[in-house]
Image: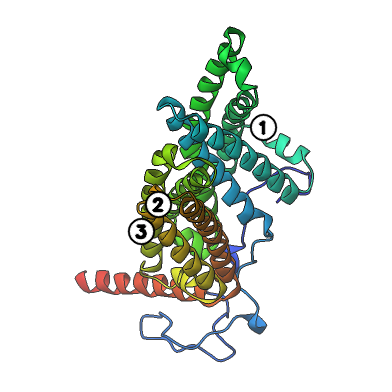
Amino acid sequence: MTDDDGLLREPRSDAGAADLHAPTFGAGRDRHDDQGVAADSEFRSYYGRPVLKPPVWEWKVPAYLFTGGLSAGAALLSAGADLTGRPALCRAGRLGGFGALLASSYLLIADLGRPERFHHMLRVAKPSSPMSVGTWILVAYGPGSGLAAMTELLPSSLRAMLPGRLPARVGRLAGLSSAAFAPALASYTAVLLSQTAVPAWHEARRELPFLFAGSAAASGAGLGMLLAPVHEAGPARQLAALGASAELVAARLIERRPGLETKAYSRGRAHRLRRASEYLTLAGALAAVTVARRSRPAAAAAGLALLAGSALQRFGTFDAGVASTKDPAYVVVPQRARLNARGGQHRHGDQVE
């Protein structure tokens, strides 16, 4: 999203519109106790309209979240494969990771509308802005991913000769460079979402980075299992089990958090997408540690399941956030509870005095 001057800006929702002192609780009067705190009553917003403005992001944003995470997971996997002498797995991770990065960059620029808006973010470095930090993470990550992928395109006959050894060493350093920035790439988008006023994203701010990092690892592992031979895909199978476990645990922790805001994850379209994601991710992880160790078709099927599960998790998380801005209850009920809690603390303080 951009400001009128074309500068990339962070997503914003008008949280200030949810002022509890505005008459958003219905046409009739609220009942008050003797301390002036509003008692529970049925509420509705002005003419049934949302209290917050829903994000204007389109499907390109959750797709961008998925492809960026896939690239990060593939970069980690390819670096490990390179260091342990698994050339086919390394090649799959480098080429697949760079392809995912290209797709992610296209989706981001397409959502911005004009390519120069990404360039505008490079004018400043603002540590307090997740979007600014994320832009520089992409800038630091991209060259290593691209250079490592380019070295994989060299003919094998040339790479075996003395002139080809130098590019291979450069490719290893580039791959390690991209792997160093991969964890930040996988998780910064979770920080970006959680710093908005969107209730479902902000309330899950502690779990979202782990959810996105686990999802990125699972998708990168799925790509490796899909493209690499079984005898080289051992690290991919291990990463699949680790990433899927982190993703599933984080997803359940979000759903079980107290408070109304996270209920958006277990209702409607978001719930259906995330439940399908959990089934696919669990199936892919179980296959990775069992039948995928011996069967190439089973490994490919497990890889596809992990990729699909990761994608659905990002779309489900995105939908939960949008849904939480459309229903006034996700804003008004928690704010009213906090107001009542402050009123109770004031009453307790008066009694102590």
Q: Is residue 257 left or right of residue 190?
A: left
Determine which quarter of the picture holds residue 53: bottom right
Q: How crowded is the residue under tag 2: few (<14 C-alpha within 10 Å), some, or many (20+)?
A: many
**Outermost bottom residue:** 28
- Residue nearest the observer in this picture, 25 or 348: 25
Which mark identifies residue 249? Answer: 3
Q: How is the image coloured?
A: rainbow
Q: Is residue 101 left or right of residue 246?
A: right
Residue 86 position within the rendered picture, expressed as x and y whole percent measured from the top left: 45, 30
Q: Earlier in the sequence, mark 2 or mark 3?
A: 3
Residue 42 position within the rendered picture, expressed as x and y whole percent measured from the top left: 49, 88
The residue depicted at 41 percent of the width and 61 percent of the height is 282
Total marks shown come to 3
The residue depicted at 55 percent of the width and 37 percent of the height is 92
Badge 2 element:
helix
- Residue nearest the observer in this picture, 242 or 331: 242
The residue depicted at 50 percent of the width and 56 percent of the height is 301
Determine which quarter of the picture holds residue 49: bottom right
Residue 323 position within the rendered picture, expressed as x and y whole percent measured from the top left: 57, 71
